[in-house]
Image (cartoon, rainbow, N blue to C red):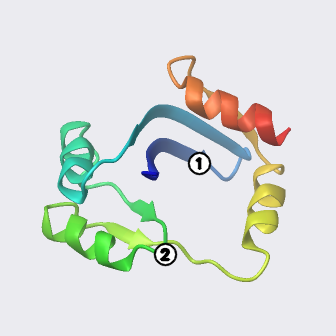
């Protein structure tokens, strides 16, 4: 089975504890080149992209394809629960054009 690739574009307002999610993309079975092209075509090639730390080879390949600010996430023991607890400290505002994010957030509530 192919893994789902997801790109979530957001801005964090630390002062007001808000996260604004304004774009999403997800697909199955995409190559690193296809993923890099989506990032570039959406205008995020110069944005900081946080990627799955388990995919170091993919991160390096996407970087070579022009997405220079992609980097691995920092994961530690219990990081999923810590991440959920961190998100619960924020108001999350999601554009209606991001239905996958809305569904994921509803699944965690």
The crowd level at tag 2 (other Cα within 10 Å; few <14, some 14-19, many 20+) is: some
For the residue pair 76 and 11, the one nearer the viewer reads as 76
Residue at left offset 45%, top offset 63%: 50
Tell me residue 72's x, y (percent): 44, 74
> Does residue 41 sit above or below 96 in this rendering?
below
Residue at left offset 52%, top offset 72%: 73
For residue 53, the mark is: 2
The crowd level at tag 1 (other Cα within 10 Å; few <14, some 14-19, many 20+) is: few
Residue at left offset 74%, top offset 62%: 83
Tell me residue 41's x, y (percent): 19, 38
> Does residue 63 sit above or below 25 in this rendering?
below
- Regarding mark 1 in the picture, which secondary structure is present there? strand
Tell me residue 18's x, y (percent): 69, 41
**Left-right relation of 100 to 59:** right
Separation of marks 1 and 2 at Cα, in angstroms = 21 Å
For the residue pair 82 and 93, the one nearer the viewer reads as 82
Do labels 1 and 2 touch, CB within 8 Å?
no
Furthest residue in direction top, as rendered: 96
The residue tagged 1 is 12
For the residue pair 28 and 53, the one nearer the viewer reads as 28
Tell me residue 90's x, y (percent): 77, 46
Furthest residue in direction left, as rendered: 65
State which tag comes first along the sequence, 1 or 2.
1
For residue 63, the mark is: none
């Amino acid at each position: 089975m192919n893994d789902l690739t997801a790109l979530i574009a957001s801005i964090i307002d630390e002062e007001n504890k808000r996260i604004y999610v304004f774009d999403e993309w997800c697909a199955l079975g995409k190559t690193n080149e296809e993923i890099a092209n989506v990032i570039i075509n959406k205008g995020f090639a110069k944005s900081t992209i946080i990627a799955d730390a388990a995919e170091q080879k993919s991160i390096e390949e996407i970087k070579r394809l022009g997405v220079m600010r992609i980097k691995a996430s920092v994961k530690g023991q219990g990081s999923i629960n810590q991440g959920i607890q961190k998100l619960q400290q924020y108001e999350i505002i999601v554009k209606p054009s991001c239905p996958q994010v809305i569904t994921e957030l509803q699944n965690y509530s």
